[in-house]
Image: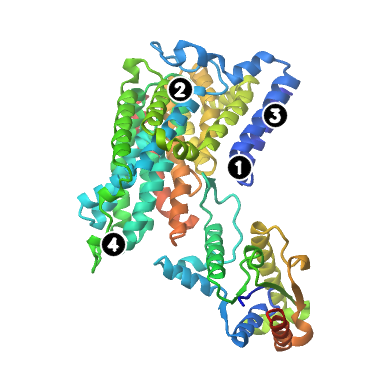
Amino acid sequence: MAQIIALVIFVAMFVLIVTDKIERHYVTLGCGLLTLILVFGVCMRDPAAIMNTLNVKPIFTLDFWYAPHAEGEESGGINWATIIFIAGMMIMVEGMARAGFFRWLCMKLAKLVHYKTIPVFVTFMLMSFVLAMFIDSITVILFLASVTIELSRLLKFDPVPMILSEVFCANLGGSATMCGDPPNIIIGTSLGYSFFDFILNTGAMAVIALVFTLIYFYLVFRKQYSTPSENIDISALPSPESCITDKKGFALSTVIFLIAVVMLVTHSMTHLTVAFIGVFVSLATVLANTRHLGYIMKRVDYKTLLFFIGLFVVVGGLEQTGVLETVAGFIGKISGGNSKLMIAIIIWGSAVASAFIDNIPFAATMIPVIKTLAVSSGVPLDTLAWALSMGTDIGGSGTPIGASANVVGTSAAAKAGHPIGWGEYCSKAAPATVIVLAVCTAYIFVVYL
Amino acid sequence: MQFIISIGREYGSGGHEIGRHLAERLGVDFCDRNMLDRIAEEKDTSAENLRKYDETPKRFLLSRTVRGFSNSPEEIIARMQFEYLEKKAKSGESFIVVGRCAESVLKDCEGLISLFITGDEDAKIDRVAEHRSMTRDQAKMAILRHDKKRKAYHNYYCEGKWGDSRNYELTINSSKLGIMGTVDILEQYIRLRTQ
């Protein structure tokens, strides 16, 4: 009975998220509450399951902040490390945005390539990839798309191909690191992987895929950008320096960002957890912006944090009632013990699912599944984790609703008078998604199996 | 004195034509899909890109909202038009606008006169069949399709329901007096209201 109710709540949550009629944080929080009351309270009568799912106790242990022996979250439920880390990064990013960092960076790079369309196109794709490795893709695209639109008006080019390519590269960049995309943070903190583990595995795949992506988008869009625009007054373009709204804040936020990158890259050596890094960068940003604290805190996306909390509870319900073990058993059965088929199912199945539904709940749900699969099938958990990571991160690139960056990018384009329909989006992004997934599948088959 | 006339209409009722005649007689600007040409000009883009999403209901399951950013082109174009109307109303200019949820978007404007034009089914079918060179059956289907679309579009953005007489100052059946007769009576009404 508990299994059925947990499953019904989970399916209802997914349907409500997909229909987009109620804000998604209300959906997950409501469904999370129902899970606690109906599944754990009424059906299981198990207070321990509620405590396990709320998962508050570990926050008060040293291992949560400093972990010399990284093992990942022992129990399921709310992944507080992910939530604290994301909250910290959000605060840091808002500090950078307030000082004008992102706009300055975009304008600086555009100036460095002399505002020439094709070099701007390639540079912005690369910048999108690199920034998304460390910063959430929504913020990256918010700034990049807005600068692209501004430049397109002044330099007279169509911003749509550039925005589509930037969005794709942001998703690809996000897949390269542990902190780039929420599914990776959840996978990393749940399974005890470090930033370095991701760089060496998903990062390697993402860099190879980036080469294919650059070639693909260049070939697809080169004609649109090959005719140089005439009568362009470069002096009308804003100088990079004019984008900086607060010089002191700019310098401090840049330093904090660099420290965050160093802390992330070295956290497997320093043993500082991502939760610690999140708290550190947020405190540093708060101290550096005491006068603008209200502005920054107001802009933090609390809704996403609440969404995560509710989501983890609902997935915890599935985990505690054993539904996910059944799913793992099913995948194991249809793959017949063939590890290549199992990997293919995980990477391509995750990709197809992520193209149409939110990849965050999908990844959170699949983690217990791959844990069970690793035990039952003997395929190393790492391999399954990288397949899940690339599938969920890249699959979302295929459609306008597959990933948050796609939504923000297409929204910015439409607001500027360039609406992008499903046909246009998918005809350009879906082939690139298939190419990247094929590259990742081949890489996993060759390197890990 | 500023006045703004919003005209909601059933497909085939002649609401658009009535609006155009009223605008000519009253000497005011007439806003319909031409709003998109003006918006496109402001945004330095092609109106062609925007037209296919004009007065089109949002397609559920095919769009998402992230941090308040919706990527539904239908919704974004609709909101652009609402903003355009609000800006125009604030400028103090008198004008007539057809559709685009104007009776709801501009409900706080003092000079708003909201009208809804309906029509007898047979008269609407005849009109659509003649104007679109269709058979009566095709015209009937077109009316059903267009009205369904307008209703879905309107009811997504507005609290009041499309065509519900309680939402409009005046609801009139254009089949009774014909298009020009309806224009005459509405012109008199507007002149009295704006005296």
Amino acid type of the residue that numbered disc 3 sits on in the rendered structure: Leu
Does dot 3 land on a helix, a strand or a loop? helix
Residue at image mark 4 = A155
Marks 2/4: CA–CA distance = 44 Å
Point out the tag, 4 or 3, that comes first from the N-terminus: 3
Mark 2 is on which residue type? Thr
Q: How many marks?
A: 4
Residue located 38% across and 28% down the image: A287
For marks 3 and 1 on the same chain, the one whose residue lies earlier in the sequence: 1
Residue B106 or residue A230, whichever sits in front: B106
C-alpha separation, residue under disc 2 versus residue under disc 3 = 26 Å
Q: CA distance from mark 3 to mark 1?
A: 17 Å
Figure quadrant of residue A247: top left
Of B86 and B47, which appears nearest the observer?
B86
Q: Residue at x 42, y 65 (%)?
A: B43
Describe the element under mark 2 as helix, strand or loop.
helix
Residue, disc 1: A23
Which residue is pictured at 73% across the width and 61% down the height? B161
Q: Which residue is mark 3?
A: A34
Residue A374: mark in rendering: none
Residue B181 at x, y percent in the picture? 73, 88
Q: Nearer the viewer, mark 4 or mark 3?
A: 4
Q: Secondary structure at mark 1?
A: loop
Quick one: label 1, few (<14), some, or many (20+) residues within 10 Å?
A: some
Q: Position of residue A261 (x, y in %)?
A: 32, 29
Q: Sequence-wise, which precedes: disc 2 or disc 1?
A: 1
Q: Which mark identifies residue A189?
A: 2
- Callout 1 amino acid: Glu
**Nearest-to-viewer mark from 3 and 1:** 1
